[in-house]
Image (cartoon, helix red, strand yellow):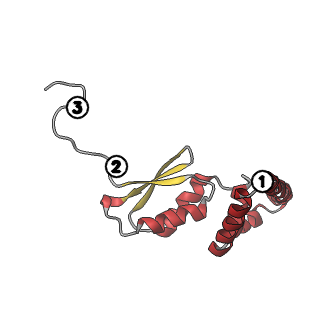
Amino acid sequence: MTAAVRARLGTLLGVLLSGEHRRPAEELVRQLTDLYGDGLARVVAILREQAPDLLGAIAADDAVTDLLALHDLHPLDAATRVRRALARVGGDVGYLGLDDGVVRVWLGGGCSSVPRATVEAAVRDAAPELAGVEFVTALYEIGVGPPAGRAS
């Protein structure tokens, strides 16, 4: 889905959900999403059974990835999609994990050659269902003095 389409959908939903017809608008969106989701689930099931390579190729398309992720039908889990996206971004970037919908991403040395916005966009494109990206710039800290809880 293009950024322009996403923006337009956001605008339309904002207008509908802020007006007096909020409840019918929410129900309409839910019903349409369920309708398309059911159909998409059937297509994915057939592809998984009869043409798994084709399903992988279709799932690699950006617009299809969004739809499959929305309906929890993507053949790859979010962590795998994020790892692949980070590998494509390149640079000194690494995957640290996924917890409660938030991806932890390591940026090498606190000064990665890849801008945070680029990394975040790659993660969101690969796994739009995730809640966010947390950036970590140091994998460990060297402290001075005794460990916490110990007297010197």
Quadrant (top left, top right, bottom left, bottom right) of the C terminus: top left
Residue ID for mark 2: 139
Q: In screen coordinates, is 127 left or right of 17?
A: left
- Of the two numbered discs 1 and 3 on the same chain, state the one appearing first in sequence: 1
Q: Residues within 10 Å of mark 3 (few under 14, many from 20)?
A: few
In this rendering, which labeled residue sits more in front, label 1 or label 3? 1
* Number of numbered tags placed on the structure image: 3
Nearest to N terminus: mark 1 or mark 2: 1
Q: Residue 139: x and y, percent?
A: 34, 49
Element under label 3? loop
Picture coordinates of residue 108 (x, y %)? 34, 60
Which residue carries the number 3 mark? 147
Kind of residue sitting beneath label 3: Pro
**Tag 2: amino acid:** Leu
User: Callout 2: 10 Å neighbours few (<14), some, many (20+)?
Assistant: few
Name the image quarter holding residue 18.
Answer: bottom right
Mark pair 1, 3: CA separation = 53 Å
Q: Nearer the viewer, residue 56 or 27?
A: 27
Label 1 sits on residue: 26
**Viewer-proximal residue among 91 and 70:** 70
User: Residue at coordinates 32% horizontally, 52% vertically from top-left?
Assistant: 138
